[in-house]
Image (tube, rainbow, N blue to C red):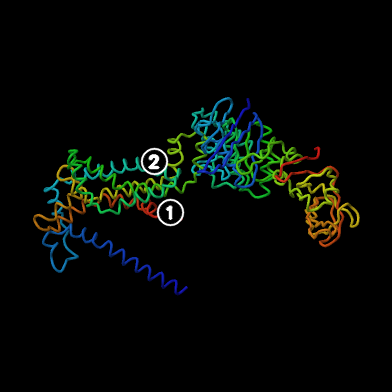
Amino acid sequence: MQMNHFALLVRTVAAWLVTLLLVFPLIWLVLTSFKTELQAIAVPPRLFFTPTLESFREVNLRSDYLHHAANSVVTSFVSTFIGLAIAAPAAYSMAFFRTRRTRDILMWMLSTKMMPAVGALVPVYVMAQTAGLLDSRTALIVVFTLSNLPIMVWMLYSGFKDIPPDILEAARMDGASIWGEFTQVIRPLAMGTLASTGLLCLVLAWNEAFWSLNLSSAKAGTLAALIASYSSPEGLFWAKLSAASLLAIAPIVVVGWFSQKQLVQGLTFGAVK
Amino acid sequence: MSFLELRGVEKHFGSLKAIKGIDLAVEKGEFVVFVGPSGCGKSTLLRMIAGLTEIDAGSLRLDGRDITRLASSKRDLAMVFQSYALYPHMSVADNMSFALRLANVDKAVIREKVRRAAEILNLSQYLERTPKELSGGQRQRVAIGRAIVRAPKVFLFDEPLSNLDAALRGQTRVEIAKLHRELGATTIYVTHDQVEAMTLADRVVVLRDGAIEQVGSPLELYDRPANQFVAQFIGTPQMNIVDSAALPALRDAAGVDGASDGFIGVRPENVLVRPAGSGRLAGHVELVESLGADTLIYANVGDGGATARTVQLVARQNERTALQPGDAVGLDIVPASFHLFDRQGRVVSARAA
């Protein structure tokens, strides 16, 4: 019993330390965004100061936050919905009509995620350019959808696999079409999986920086592109960079906070059972 | 033309023929049971009728219409699964009304049909519960209820009782028989349990290795098995089957006339135990199983020393016995009760029923 208490204590302390380590940059970001540029680079760093909204004002004046935010919202939501619409039928077929190749196809899909994105940069860029889609939301939506598709198929596949196939056969015997099977039986039973898959892909698309930096600028630039615009050319302005970053991540942090249950469930699916 | 007709129906798995050209006709209102050892293809055959497994060759006709390639959802058949396969997210009432709701049947009609089915199956007070709040037997009844509210052309049952305990199994078996008597619905029922086959069926189809061994009423199969496999599969304990060369004395005891080379089969109830010294065969008791109403006596019978071989015969009687293992006994065979099989296991002659 003594040993157990001690082990529990050690584990709790360790968990808190790790959490602090992970959250520290975020806390620092929040603090810095409320400082002036001078306070931001002060050595030693100041923990206590009079907060100011100066940086936020600057950011708002210099760039159009709402425009970038709208780009982020549109690209991440649309790519998530299109992705779900493609991934759900694929996962349905792989989970309930397995063939000898099903496993291979799943592995192949996942393997595309192993390749560094930069490897596909030139061809994708040229394709976007040829199609006249550079700096357009359409290009970002297509790329976000495709790059998230393997993960979506995998998550939905492992969620669907937990539904006993007998139940779908019973629905078929009861006269359900494939659409009826999906809406009446699979959707209610796999609601958790569908929600967590959607949420995860929403977060991934929102946070996506590589493709949005390379394929978009002023017109279709997402919040990730907005943050990046505060770094290099005129040197680093820590307070303004932090303020822009905070504005960019705030929405998704809020969404993530309220849906953490679904997210965790989705990511550990199959592992706990 | 019969109500449901299978003609040369086949299923291939790669190069393996799992179902080898089944011909079968089922009449309207008939209760047909598919029975056979595991792996004989009985469930596959049922799933092919259901449309859940594709038919690779042959044709299937229902009510005058070719349904070989028709989707399950359009066949108008209802199936009760071994696992019950209830919709876990729906109440009992919703489970039972699912098919009717998909078919856009009027709400009042649905309510009435569900109410009546629930009454028949004793589920009236559980209509609002979900499947996980029910016992195994209740779930089983919901699965049956889901089938009967639809009044389908044919009921398909896939080993519906194998997940229930023995007492409930017997009770549900009686209920299914009663239900069939009341509804008169055409039914195909798959089981590996020959007691279910014997008690429920109008006709039994015995399957082995994807082919039909024999089709007949339960007593026809019992009294006139077409071959050694059916003879041994139907009836507990199994029919005694003895190589006629192994025990020449049995031929005389059973009254087999003429020279025939093959196997002699005798049902345990036709082996009569006599006091030692009497009877046409002599042997020793190996084991006595007292079941209460029945007593099974396993006796080793030798051929009087000509060879060292002994043959075990099982006798079944409804009187109790004081015999102990090791006791000497005499045995007689009820006259003309034998079955004769050739070396391939086909019946040569059987007693008149």
Above or below, B183 against A133 in this view is above
Q: Which residue does the numbered mark 2 point to in the structure image? A: A89
Q: Which residue is mark 1?
A: A270
Q: Residue furthest bottom?
A: A2
Q: Are marks 2 and 1 on the same chain?
A: yes
Q: Residue furthest right?
A: B278
Residue type, numbered disc 2:
Pro
Q: In what quadrant of the picture does the N terminus of chain B appear?
A: top right
**Circle on res. A252:** none
Q: Quadrant of residue B141?
A: top right
Which residue lies at the image location 91% right of the left edge and 54% below the top edge? B278
Q: Chain of mark 2?
A: A
Location of residue A14 (image quadrant): bottom left
Look at label 1 and name its amino acid: Gly
Front position in the image: B132 or B257? B257
| Element under disc 2 | helix
